[in-house]
């Protein structure tokens, strides 16, 4: 099972247990974050659009950091113009805990509660 979700105008393909670096999120280390799903693929096939409206990717924040430094050098020939600048892109590393629909999980919990209530009544 895998899902494609969107964050920061980029789309990521993930499975449960994957770790990946995303654009910086406003979340502390250890926090749980959720992302809306664009596409979901499992044993029953591929689901898109309204079929995945309630689906979420749940992940936990592992680290906040900065990527390796890159050098931006601007140069104009014969004009004695040179500009050297460095940049380190901030990122958030997350680990995917679960992929799925919140509605399905709620429906399953409700069904289990109903079964338990029936069993106690007998």
Image (spheres, rainbow, N blue to C red):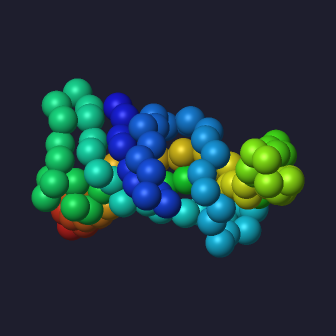
- Residue 2 appears in the picture as rendered: yes
The residue at the point 62 percent across, 39 percent down is 19
Left or right, 17 with reference to 70 = left
Q: Is residue 122 left or right of residue 24?
A: left
Q: Quadrant of the N terminus?
A: top left
* Image location of residue 87, percent across then percent down: 79, 55
Percent across and percent down for residue 37 are 33, 53
Please report the residue visible at 68 percent of the width from the left and 55 percent of the height from the top.
92
Q: Quadrant of residue 81?
A: bottom right
Q: Nearer the viewer, residue 91 or 29?
A: 91
In the rendered view, tell whether residue 64 sits above or below residue 95: below
Relative placement, left or right, of 97 versus 27 is left
The residue positioned 23% from the left and 27% from the top of the image is: 43
Residues 73 and 46: in front is 73
Across and down, in percent, residue 101 comes to 30, 55
Please name whichever residue, 56 or 89, is drawn nearer the observer in this view of the structure.
89
């Amino acid at each position: 099972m895998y899902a494609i979700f969107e964050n920061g105008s980029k789309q990521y393909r993930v499975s449960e247990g994957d770790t990946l670096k995303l654009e910086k999120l406003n979340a502390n280390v250890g926090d749980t974050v959720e992302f809306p799903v664009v596409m979901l693929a499992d044993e029953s096939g591929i689901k898109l659009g309204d079929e995945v409206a309630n689906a979420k990717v749940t992940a936990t924040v592992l680290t906040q950091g900065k990527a390796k430094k890159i050098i931006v050098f601007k140069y104009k020939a014969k004009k004695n113009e040179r500009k050297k600048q460095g940049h380190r892109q901030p990122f958030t590393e997350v680990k995917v805990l679960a992929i799925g629909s919140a509605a399905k999980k709620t429906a399953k919990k409700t069904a289990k509660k109903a079964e338990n209530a029936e069993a106690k009544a007998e």
